[in-house]
Amino acid sequence: MNLKEYIRSIPDYPKKGILFRDITTLIKDENAFAESINQIVEKSKKFKFTKIAAIESRGFVFASAVSYILKKPFVMLRKKNKLPAEVHSIDFELEYGTATIEVHKDSINDNDSVLIIDDLIATGGTAEAAAKLVEISKGKVAAFIFVINLFDLGGSDNLTKKNYKVENLINFPGH
């Protein structure tokens, strides 16, 4: 199954000059969604990890299903002020603004190895922030798996240069 066929491209969203790759058309098709989860599960077998983390919000869609199948704990990396207990917090740059993500301080333990799943990597700012959250929690990043890699924006390459392992299901240009 060619998962690229299930991704809708929307020009000038959320602002002019951005070509948004929309995964809602993939997840609304039960066969395409199932195939994407199966591919993530298969790619995850290359890595040793104790927990799965995902970045709010679209990463939750994929990671929670993978967590269920693999019977691994699921850690939510959330936007600022969405978690009720004590958190670690990281501010970072997006290609169209700034943001903050957080994780509960008790979600990742010393020596946990964490697989981070997200729907898309562009410039890599969010992914790097997620890695920092895992690391300040005393865990280590086992790998990243993205549904979509916007290869010409360099995020995946930047993560690889920082010695993170990176996998993805689909490659698209970012523009």
Image (spheres, rainbow, N blue to C red):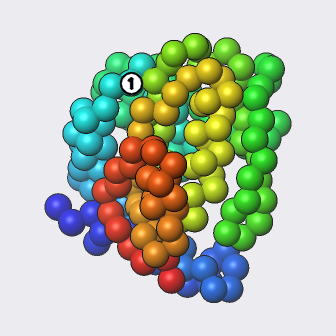
Q: Residues within 10 Å of mark 1 (few under 14, many from 20)?
A: some
Q: Position of residue 103 (x, y in %)?
A: 69, 30
Q: Position of residue 37 (x, y in %)?
A: 31, 43
Which corner quadrant of the image does residue 132 belong to? top right
Residue 126, relative to residue 15: is it above or below? above
Relative vertical location of residue 129 with respect to residue 147 in this rendering, above or below: above
One can see residue 31 in this view: yes
Q: Residue at x 35, y 19 (%)?
A: 71
Q: Position of residue 68 (x, y in %)?
A: 37, 25
Residue at 77% in and 66% down: 97
> In the rendered view, does 169 fall on the left or right side of 82?
left
Q: Which residue is mark 1?
A: 49
Residue drawn at x 42%, y 19% is 50
Can residue 28 be seen from the camera position used here? no
> Judging from the image, what secondary structure is the residue with disc 1 in?
loop
Q: Is residue 16 left or right of residue 97?
A: left
Please name the amino acid that badge 1 sits on: Phe
Decide if residue 30 is on the left or right side of residue 146.
left
Please state which of residues 87 and 82 is positioned toward the viewer in this rendering: 87
State the residue in front, 162 or 124.
162
Q: Residue at 53%, 38% (x, y): give it.
A: 54
Against 13, is 131 above or below? above
